[in-house]
Amino acid sequence: MNVSRSICVAFILIISICFNSFATFVYAAQTGIDKININQEFGYSEAIVEKSTGITTSITYPRTDLENVDTSMLGWIKGLYEASKKELTFLRRINPRISMEFNLNYNSYLMGGRYAGIEIFGTKGISTNKNEKSIIKTYNISVDGKRILSNDEIISNKMYDDVLVLLKERIINSLGEGYSEQIEKLNGSSLDNIVLTHKGVKVILEKGVYFPESLGTLSYVIKYRDLGEAFRLPDKYFSGMSPTMPIDPNKPIIALTFDDGPGKATEQILDILEDNDARATFCVLGNRVAKNSDTVLRAFQNGNEIVGHSWDHKDLTKLNYAGIKKQLEDTNNAIFDITGIMPAFHRPPYGATNNNVKKASEELSLAMLYWSVDPYDWKTKDAQAIYDDIMGSVKNGSIILCHDIHESTGEAMEMIIPALIEQGYQLVTVSELLNYGENIVESGQLYRKAENLSLTYFPATTIYAEFIDESH
């Protein structure tokens, strides 16, 4: 009897799972949820898809694995969702035919591995009302601090008036003089929804709140340099920030890295990368940066990442703590003087580390960069041998070690970079590689390759079961 009952329960459970999966798939096809953008820069995506009596729901939201951040975001989403269901229950008592659509999605931006911006946006539509309600919520995050930043920590509240002048100028340039009355009424609350992006602080004006609903939700970016003293976060992590490369989650990603330069092959490698729309990471020696400033700047402006490889290639494990810190700081400052960005990584010479190197790295907010593929280009100085080694060893998530001080390495890259792209590899920077998907780089930690490189979007009806009440 117990066996028969168990089989029956199992059968019902299987049918239920299959039905829910089918319903989710059908709904995805009907609403286009399968087209959701999953190329997010920070955290990873989770989703709730539900179609129950009277309400159709599609919620895609970020998970950051930062407890305080996730608790706040999920609490807000759940509260909004539950309030919408209560509203629908009330409306259906008056008119049982009323239905609701509730949709949320998001964009995320990661700056220098240290700060992140998240904008959650969506709509709530009721069948008896032609106008959908716009939903906007923004979060700005200190990754190292593992917390949400207040707006006052980003923009000085004493300088809101100055920022409003900048905002109004952009609105006038966009909409013209026809909305001068609404523009003049903008005040400090107009800056409630701001988000950190690569280009600047994005100000989002919710649909129908400040301007006619017909204009929809409006957004304007104020560049960091234009904000001047009003911008309160460390300028070195934002000035001149270049956007990260869009990453296709269905293709493998790898990072080419070049040590000891700038050197003989650097310009040649930059030409090849540019011709193939690819990026790499250059691990430079501090004492070579200033005298090769044009090359460093070109590399950075083309979207490549510049990180330190010590000042003069000393074995850091043979230095005292002060000596280690000076090697790292002097190199970082040299890079910052050219790029305006403080590096998020450094590669210890010879790959040599100890507790003091780890401690200094952590204190300077640097992760330590290793490698998973080493073609010994410095030893063979043979382009074909370098090509054969890399093409035979590379895999998804690989970090490849090379040296741009050897002409043979440049010659090898003429073959390697096009060949890797032809095989479907995406060539990205180490920050793009190691921060992709669920991964978050931590200062003081050592990274040989990227882990957990899988699809970041998992449509499901049961990820957060407490959100879903089948009775509605």
Image: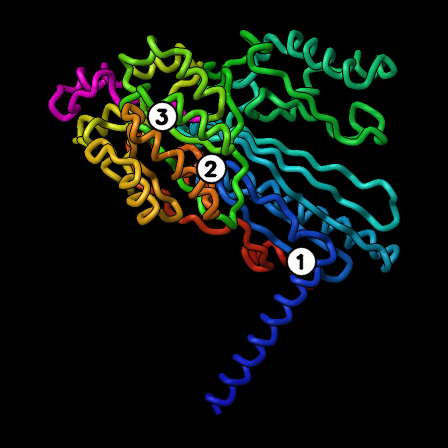
* Foreground disc of the pair 2, 1: 1
Task: Give the CA separation, mark 2 to mark 1.
Answer: 27 Å
Q: Magenta segment: does it hold 314? A: yes
Which residue is rendered at x = 84% and y = 31% of the image?
213
Circle 1 Cα neighbour tier, 10 Å, few/some/many (<14 / 14–19 / ≥20):
many
Circle 1 residue:
50
* Foreground disc of the pair 2, 3: 3
Q: Is residue 140 above or below residue 37?
A: above
Which residue is nearer to you in this view: 179 or 312?
Answer: 312
Image x and y of residue 240, in percent: 51, 17
Q: Earlier in the sequence, mark 1 or mark 3?
A: 1
Which residue is nearer to you in this view: 338 or 16?
Answer: 338
The residue stretch that appears in magenta: 304-329
Circle 3 residue:
282
Task: Give the CA separation, mark 1 to mark 3.
Answer: 47 Å
Visible residue check, residue 179: yes
Q: Is residue 272 left or right of residue 13?
A: left
The amino acid on which the numbered mark 2 sits, given as a three-letter code, is: Asn
Task: Give the CA separation, mark 2 to mark 3.
Answer: 35 Å
Q: Are marks 2 and 3 in contact (CB under 8 Å)?
A: no
Image x and y of residue 429, in percent: 42, 32
Which residue is nearer to you in this view: 153 or 453?
Answer: 453
